[in-house]
Image (cartoon, rainbow, N blue to C red):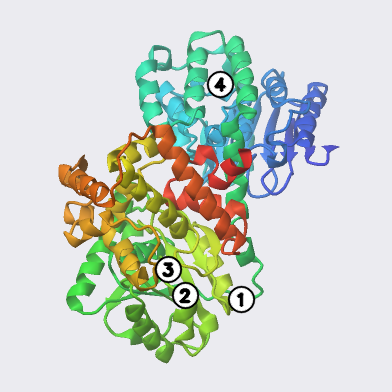
């Protein structure tokens, strides 16, 4: 029985199966909502039906809202009304969950009277990541089904849980070992025999939510949120759920959802959501087959090379890593093993997975080991002469169609490619540290790059679960060019009256995870110093230039790795250093600058002005493919606060 294009009813004895078929992710579009509401009405008028299984076609259960409806006025029937109708049905409904049950999808499942999940399924309420809160009963029903601490974690972080975790907490009744529909049918039959369970809205919250320390929870969230409002709003909704009658809490939740849906924060987070999905579109358009990524070569086993190798191993690739000598190989293997063991400790790898990943790594100093690879990524020191030598050796031994990639932060990939016999196969792959964690991959396309190289970069990003952004060739590409511009401006503010820790505090209060000087210390001051020395010969004599960072580097203060940089480090924690302040004051005096006070607003206004001006120049010159790519780069690679939407988003709002 077809009720609407995406919803149908079929019968199997006294069981009705309601199926949603709304590809690609069975989102809760208006047509789906209308179809579900009609299904409830039809089933209520079918006395022969004793139970219902709610299933979905394709690979997933309902994986959230229809993204085309985000930010627009809700259209009837509203999802809360649909869920209320399911919950009030005369017969039990059982959700058969596969793939993902997210947002409104999980709220529909919570309105059902039973839930069965397939292995590998994910269940979550990710609304806070879009600047809103659940708006169809998630904050009210979930804590009436699972323990308060688990509900609080799911709702305020937005992180999904596995089917196995859902079973442990009581979110699902069973995990199907084989056929999901068969398991859900069995559960529906059992509920029909036992009698429909009490609706979640008619239950009390599961302890200890009613006795939670709300103020302490708010303090913890406030520190993590860094100015984002939705996690604290979600906490407030949970507090309502614990302290108010269920239906009053439900009304307040809906009002909160509607208010937040029109907020600036939600607009910014929707912008980022769509921008990430558009990023790297030109890579998908490349009309060529990508290189085989089953066996990848990596040259250099330092911090970046080890991180890249570990990311590849975690993705299932075999890795041949080349270093200078036996001692360097051992050190590289130790770094990579440490990363893999860290993933094992965090539960990302089981014992067998750890053993398998470790076995797929081979190290050595002979480039001949790379010849079977269709992709080789060099990650040696950021020096053009060193990288040119590496590429000359690769050019001589690799197969003609092998892709040669450089992990460079600043260098001219066009010039590097021109030193090879087949420049079209050279591409830049700028990973961010730590390479096995950071989600951004800046793909640097040369003037003559082949479609095969671009397709390979896209396939690699997908395999490593990274978001690719395509950049043209310039000094620093998208991200480092913009960061260098506002970092210079921050150095000028130091000369004019600010101090590093004041600038860092202003950036943190704005929402950055770290301030610019703490970031430099973490990354190492020596890389940017090498870049500045390289530019020195061509720097215009009348160009303003701050010597403060150079003076620190001349003293061997390269950041955390040397125990001192912009800060001193005691037990790994940054401490403001009077020596650094003294150098800054000396430079102000040398330049004849009368120092003045800077407010946090002054600091942020100046940073944003320079960041946006340089970003616009990057866009105007065609270095970035679009303004949204700049926002994605600054958010994923440089800690720009996600809930602010990115510098180009903010420039557009202003």
Q: Which residue is mark 1?
A: 451
Q: Which residue is mark 4?
A: 141
* First along the sequence among labels 2 and 1: 2
* Residue 113 visible in the picture: no
Name the disc covering residue 231, or none: none
Q: CA distance from mark 2 to mark 1?
A: 16 Å
| Residue 522 screen position, x and y as percent | 29, 52
Circle nearer the viewer, 4 or 1: 1
Q: CA distance from mark 4 to mark 3?
A: 43 Å
* First along the sequence among labels 4 and 3: 4
Circle nearer the viewer, 1 or 3: 1
| Residue 352 screen position, x and y as percent | 34, 58
Q: CA distance from mark 3 to mark 2?
A: 26 Å
Q: Which residue is mark 2?
A: 413
Name the disc covering residue 317, or none: 3
Circle nearer the viewer, 2 or 1: 2
Q: Residue at x 21, y 43 (%)?
A: 581
Q: Residue at x 60, y 10 (%)?
A: 248
Q: Nearer the viewer, residue 413 or 346?
A: 413
Q: CA distance from mark 1 to mark 3?
A: 22 Å
Question: Label 4: how many residues lie within 10 Å, few (<14), some (14-19) or many (20+)?
Answer: many
Image quarter in which the C terminus is found: top right
Label 4 SS: helix
Query: Is 55 placed left or right of 7 in the picture?
Result: left
* First along the sequence among labels 3 and 2: 3
* First along the sequence among labels 2 and 4: 4
């Amino acid at each position: 029985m077809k009720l609407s294009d995406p919803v149908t009813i079929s019968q199997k004895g006294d069981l009705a199966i309601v199926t949603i078929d709304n590809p690609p992710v069975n989102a809760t579009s208006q047509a789906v909502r209308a179809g579900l509401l009609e299904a409830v009405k039809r089933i209520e008028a079918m006395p022969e039906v004793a139970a219902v299984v709610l299933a979905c076609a394709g690979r997933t259960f309902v994986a959230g809202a229809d993204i085309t409806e985000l930010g627009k006025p809700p259209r009837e029937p509203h999802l809360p009304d649909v869920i209320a109708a399911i919950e009030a049905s005369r017969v039990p409904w059982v959700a058969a969950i596969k793939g993902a049950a997210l947002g409104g999808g999980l709220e529909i499942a919570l309105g059902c009277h039973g839930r069965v999940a397939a292995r590998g399924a994910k269940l979550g309420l990710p609304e806070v990541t879009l600047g809103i809160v659940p708006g169809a009963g998630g904050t009210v029903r979930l804590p009436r089904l699972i323990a308060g601490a688990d509900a609080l974690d799911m709702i305020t972080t937005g992180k999904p849980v596995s089917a196995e975790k859902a079973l442990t907490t009581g979110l699902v009744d069973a995990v199907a070992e084989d056929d999901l529909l068969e398991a859900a049918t069995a559960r529906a039959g059992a509920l029909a025999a036992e009698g429909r369970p009490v609706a979640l809205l008619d239950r009390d919250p599961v302890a200890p939510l009613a006795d939670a320390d709300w103020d302490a929870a708010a303090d913890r969230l406030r520190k993590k949120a860094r100015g984002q409002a939705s996690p604290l709003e979600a906490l407030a909704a949970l507090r309502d759920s614990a302290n108010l009658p269920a239906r009053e809490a439900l009304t307040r939740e809906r009002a909160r959802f509607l208010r937040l849906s029109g907020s600036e924060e939600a607009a910014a987070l929707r912008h980022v959501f769509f921008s990430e999905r558009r990023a790297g579109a030109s890579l998908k358009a490349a009309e060529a087959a990508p290189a085989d990524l089953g066996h990848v070569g990596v040259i250099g086993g330092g911090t970046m090379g080890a991180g890249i190798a570990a990311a590849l191993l975690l993705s299932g690739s075999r890795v041949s890593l080349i270093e200078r000598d036996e001692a360097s190989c051992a050190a590289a293997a130790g770094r990579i093993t440490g990363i893999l063991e860290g993933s094992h400790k965090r539960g990302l790898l089981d014992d067998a997975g750890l053993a398998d990943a470790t076995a797929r790594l081979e190290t050595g100093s002979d480039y001949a080991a790379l010849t079977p690879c269709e992709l080789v990524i060099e990650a040696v020191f950021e020096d053009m002469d060193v990288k040119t030598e590496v590429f000359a050796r690769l050019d001589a031994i690799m197969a003609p169609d092998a892709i040669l990639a450089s992990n460079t932060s600043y260098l001219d990939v066009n010039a590097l490619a021109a030193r090879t016999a087949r420049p079209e196969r050279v591409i830049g792959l700028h990973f961010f540290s730590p390479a096995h964690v950071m989600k951004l991959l800046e793909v640097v396309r040369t003037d003559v790059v082949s479609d095969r190289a671009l397709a390979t970069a896209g396939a690699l990003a997908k395999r490593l679960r990274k978001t690719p952004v395509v950049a043209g060739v310039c000094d620093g590409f998208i991200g480092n060019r913009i960061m260098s511009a506002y970092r210079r401006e921050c150095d000028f503010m130091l000369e004019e009256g600010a101090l590093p820790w004041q600038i860092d505090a202003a950036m943190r209060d704005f929402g950055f995870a770290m301030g610019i000087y703490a970031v430099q210390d973490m990354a190492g001051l020596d890389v940017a110093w090498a870049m500045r020395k390289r530019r020195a010969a061509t720097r215009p004599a009348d160009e303003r230039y701050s010597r403060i960072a150079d003076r620190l580097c001349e003293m061997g203060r390269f950041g955390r790795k040397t125990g001192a940089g912009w800060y001193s480090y005691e037990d790994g924690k940054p401490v403001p250093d009077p020596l650094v302040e003294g150098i800054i004051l000396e430079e102000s005096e040398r330049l004849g600058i009368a120092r003045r006070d800077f407010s946090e607003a002054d600091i942020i206004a100046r940073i944003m002005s320079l960041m946006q001006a340089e970003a616009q120049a990057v866009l105007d010159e065609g270095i970035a493919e679009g303004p949204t790519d700049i926002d994605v780069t600054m958010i994923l690679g440089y800690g720009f606060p996600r809930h602010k939407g990115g510098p180009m988003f903010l420039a557009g709002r202003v």
